[in-house]
Amino acid sequence: MKSSPPAPPAPPGVDGAPAAPASPLQLFTAFTQLALQGFGGVIAIVQRELVERRRWLTREQFLEDWAVVQILPGPNVMNLALMLGDRHFGLRGAIAAYAGMVMAPLAIVVALALFYNRFSDVAAVGGALRGMGAVAAGLIVATGLRLAVALRQHPLGWPACLGFSLTCFVAVGLLRWPLFFVLAGLGCVSCVLTWRRLAP
């Protein structure tokens, strides 16, 4: 007697369950589109694509996953692609998502490197690159403000979360302390306080 096929994933918005990619090919195409948009300020593109557009992650899930990929070695968005692909399709999904992040951007970056090598002494080229840097910074700030809403449900409460965020900004952005030590210190304190708050 054949077993019945597994039930399809709940559509977005039903019982709070996020949607799910239909196949590894959809993961590949989604991350290819994401990568082609993500020159600078990539976290803004990732959040909009995976949370707001495709709804493969809720805001809370995105914050949790992004916190994990921040402390893993390697590019953050690559780690997130591997995690999401493995979560839905195992090794096949991880490879598909990673390939989507790498293949098309690699070709574009090689072409841009050749272009820059040829025209790097042109003043307009340097000005364009500086302008794109400002745009990327603005995208990151806007994304941080949108994601801050999800911190209202954090066990430590909004004031504590704001305090940790400001402390991290001052330590890394103003005092120029090494990111590894800031994350290790503040991360450990935050994890311990959260664990104590959640403990019965």
Image: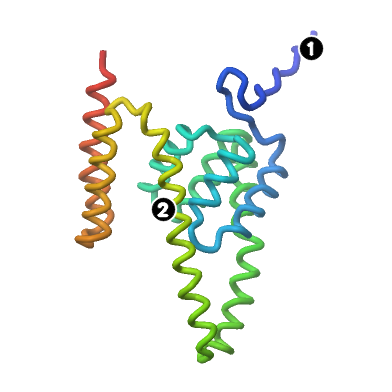
Query: How far apart are labels 2 and 1 at the CA level?
Result: 53 Å
Q: Is residue 197 left or right of residue 31?
A: left
First in sequence, mark 2 or 1: give its number. 1
Tell me residue 90's x, y (percent): 60, 36
| Residue where numbered disc 1 is placed | 2
Q: How many marks?
A: 2
Disc 2 marks a residue whose amino acid type is Val
Which of 109/37 is in front? 37
Residue 125, placed above or below residue 21: below
Is 113 placed above or below 5 here? below
Question: Hey, what amino acid is under mark 1?
Answer: Lys
Quadrant in the picture for residue 103: bottom right
- Element at label 1: loop
Instruction: Say if mark 2 contacts mark 1, CB within 8 Å.
Output: no
Crowding at mark 2 (Cα within 10 Å: few <14, some 14-19, many 20+): few
Disc marking residue 183: none
Where is mark 2, residue-wise?
A: 141
